[in-house]
Amino acid sequence: MNDTKGYCMILTTCPNIKEADELATKMIEQKLAACIQITAITSYYKWEGSTNKDAEHLMLIKTRSELYPGIEEYIKEHHSYEVPEIIRVPVQNGLPAYLNWIDEVTG
């Protein structure tokens, strides 16, 4: 069975589907992630003293934990936000076949 401490999901948001699609495609092509899901959301947040409400696209990035630094760097370099959300959530449990697949398709 896989060591589930070796897997994570990374959350980030984008201002539009075009940017989310470009980030997802490149991360998959570079084998940084096995699967990336994108969904439309509404975000409420405080920024520079103002309360904001914006339509965004949430990205759920599934990968191996050891690839997190490369994903963080890629997002920071290619994201349009001054301070993009980049949150790593460790995987506590997972279907062994799915975790094996993550191993197979990531670099």
Image: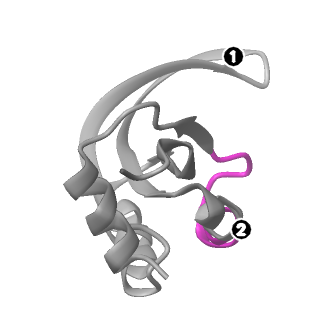
- Is residue 70 found left or right of 63 in the rendered image? right
Residue 58 x %, y %? 37, 42
- Is residue 45 found left or right of 62 in the rendered image? right
Asked where in the image residue 88 lies, by quadrant, the reply is top right
Residue 42 x %, y %? 34, 25
Circle number at residue 16: none
Which of labels 2 and 1 is toward the front?
2
Question: Is residue 85 in view from this perspective?
Answer: no
**Which residue in the protein does label 2 denote?**
73
86 and 52: which is toward the camera: 86
Magenta range: 74-84
Amino acid on which the number 2 mark rests in the picture: Glu
Circle number at residue 50: 1
Label 2 neighbour load within 10 Å: few <14, some 14-19, many 20+: few
83 is within the stretch colored magenta = yes
Classify 46 as above or below 68.
Answer: above
The residue that appears at 64% across and 52% down in the rendered structure is 81
Question: Is residue 24 in view from this perspective?
Answer: yes
3 and 90: which is toward the camera: 3
Amino acid on which the number 1 mark rests in the picture: Ser
The residue that appears at 31% across and 64% down in the rendered structure is 100
